[in-house]
Image (spheres, coloured by chain):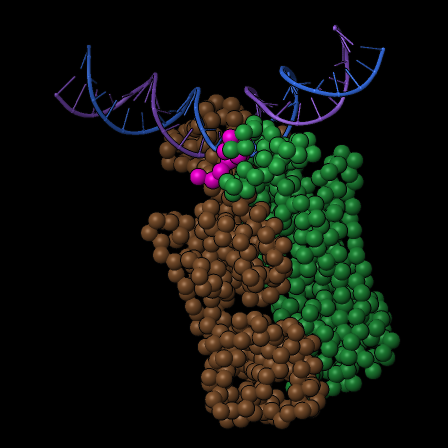
Chain colours: A brown, B green, C purple, D blue
Amino acid sequence: MAASIKDVAVRAGVSVGTVSNVLNRPAKVSPATRALVLAAIAELGFVRNSSAAQLRAGASRSLGLLVLDMANPFFQDVAKGVEDVAVQQGYAVLLCNSDEQASRENWYLQVLEEQRVRGLLITPVAGGSERLTALRERGTPAVLVDRTIPGADCCSVAVDDVAGGELAGAHLMSLGRKRIAYITGPLTLPQCADRLTGLRRATQGRTVEVAETAALKAGLGYQAALRLFETTDVDAVFCANDLLALGVLRAAISTGRRVPDDVALIGYDDIEFAADAAVPLTSIRQPRIHIGRTAAQLLFEECDSPADHAHQQVVFKPELVVRESTRH
Amino acid sequence: MAASIKDVAVRAGVSVGTVSNVLNRPAKVSPATRALVLAAIAELGFVRNSSAAQLRAGASRSLGLLVLDMANPFFQDVAKGVEDVAVQQGYAVLLCNSDEQASRENWYLQVLEEQRVRGLLITPVAGGSERLTALRERGTPAVLVDRTIPGADCCSVAVDDVAGGELAGAHLMSLGRKRIAYITGPLTLPQCADRLTGLRRATQGRTVEVAETAALKAGLGYQAALRLFETTDVDAVFCANDLLALGVLRAAISTGRRVPDDVALIGYDDIEFAADAAVPLTSIRQPRIHIGRTAAQLLFEECDSPADHAHQQVVFKPELVVRESTRH
DNA sequence: CAACCGCCGTGAAACGTTTCATCGAGGAGG
DNA sequence: CCTCCTCGATGAAACGTTTCACGGCGGTTG
């Protein structure tokens, strides 16, 4: 049905090799024939079959990006950064999300390996799968995003969550707040735990009340804050992410507390809505797009010269963004 | 480097045809040899090269989803719906976003066609490209998402925005509100214009103040609301999307207006944050996941029996979700 | 016992591209 | 005039899979 390179060759009165050259190394072919071939391509509406090209070449011009949740703004921006770099290099990005399910992750790893992607950017679900290591052993380079697996000998890009917690804590200290609460998702998540570590480091000696919720959701932040406000007299709340903080904000407003006068509030991630909340939210920003870009660059480096490539573990520092919710 | 089907055949002491049968039609091969082959596959870490498979088969087991903006929750949910159906059918989804740029859309269309995707789900950028029609003429079926191109003879799935505006208008009427404002993005966007049409239809005779902003952003909603509150005495605001509404909410709170007592507020899209806003937001919900599912199903229908396939234009009705921001 | 059938397995062709050794035609240099 | 070189184009091999016509082998039927 679809026109092949052979049809083009016949139409243009040249050999298939020449058509291929026009496609891949236009300089190698004389202007006259090149024009002839291009005309034939246009007339026939020829589109290269990349399956055949990949088959022959042995590797594809695409890479896989396997994230936990595309609804998460963090990964959206990471994806944007990855895409920037990839498209610039003429690569396509196969965007997949595992939804935090190991089974889905496995299925996508299978698909991506079958497609012979050039490399893989991945945030693995908790408890790294053996399929990923198998894939790497078979020669597909991978870069970890927002994860560092201690033993693994591969590149990774992450953000220093301890530093983020410290940033928040130091900021609250500088405001003179004394009774600080930390509302968090499951402390089994390294991020949540690290941010607490940082907070404690910065607020030495200050009361730090910790309220753990089942997930990083606004609704749970709301409930946790209502309970907290009833039992404890806090003058500052740091949340493990902005969603929780928005819930806390709602709880504060609905119980008549003023933010920041009565309660200072800091979130984490600096999602778009943080700036547009009822009281614009102070937050910790991660260089998300930059993370994606860096990860992609590391991957390309490894692809291009696997021999003299040294694995790197890049760790970015987050940044404090001050808004009304902690302004005096 | 990577093990091929031939290596497996040698290892298992069978022919390549048999290995292929184990992979694709396991029932056709005796349990004994099947076990032999599977063992060989496991030992060698064989992974099928889908380029070769596609080349031979002529079509891939993947489909393209090309959206305007993956940061938009609407498309995230649509993507989720599409994925559900696709994965269930054993198809992979190539997720691409054009960022509303025609050039990117073209590049992705090229890539997808080269990959020989089985079909395409697309929300084209304004002023449909000729490449899309070319692609369809060459035999790749496509379904339009959230768009209906009058002349185009293809399937489409959309939502009735006029009905959505009507829903909002009727609700405000039932609350007895008299002085209604509409805050919107550019009225050149069909969605914004349609929602206004619906609103006017439902609120016949009531003052409808219209404030147009440059984009559907919370910050602009905030500014527009501040201006509006200064100049006009409104008791209800309907916004073309939830982001604008969140901005309006912030403006209301910061100027001491009570929601819903002084001003009732309705958004559109029912994004996740609508429920968790400082005052939970009444909104118009679109069946987003369902849209994705339906679009994928239409596409598969067309792929599976192109002959007796009649193009359908599915239009969903939106739904009113009442929360505090309009509760009396 | 011959003829037939069903079951398993085989081997080769075909898919569309890239790559590479080769070849022919001109032009430059001796 | 012969040789050598370069430039451009050629044609066939190879990539890894699927598919399909075919064959061997045991068992069933008449």
Which residue is rendered at x = 73% and y = 77% of the image?
A: B280
What percent of the width, then of the height, locates residue B109? 58, 45
Which secondary structure dominates the residues rendered in magenta?
A: helix
Q: In this view, does A321 lie above or below B108?
A: below
Which residue is rendered at x = 85% and y = 78% of the image?
A: B175
Q: What stretch is highlighted in magenta?
A: B1-10
Q: Is residue A324 above or below residue A291?
A: below
What percent of the width, then of the height, locates residue A22? 44, 33
- Left or right side of B189 for B201: right
Asked whether residue B47 is in view, the answer is: no
Name the image quarter holding the N terminus of chain A: top right
Which residue is rendered at x = 49% and y = 91% of the image?
A: A205
What percent of the width, then of the height, locates residue B247? 65, 77
Name the image quarter holding the C terminus of chain A: bottom right
Q: Is residue B80 above or below residue B45?
A: below
Which residue is rendered at x = 53% and y = 54% of the image?
A: A130
Q: Quadrant of residue B185?
A: bottom right
Reply yes or no: does residue B231 show up in magenta: no
Asked whether residue B167 is in view, the answer is: yes
What percent of the width, then of the height, locates residue A21? 42, 32
Q: Quadrant of residue A231?
A: bottom right
Please give the count of numbered marks on the rendered protein. Answer: 0
Q: Nearer the viewer, residue B131 or B23?
A: B23
- Left or right side of B262 for D23: left
- Left or right side of B201 for B296: left
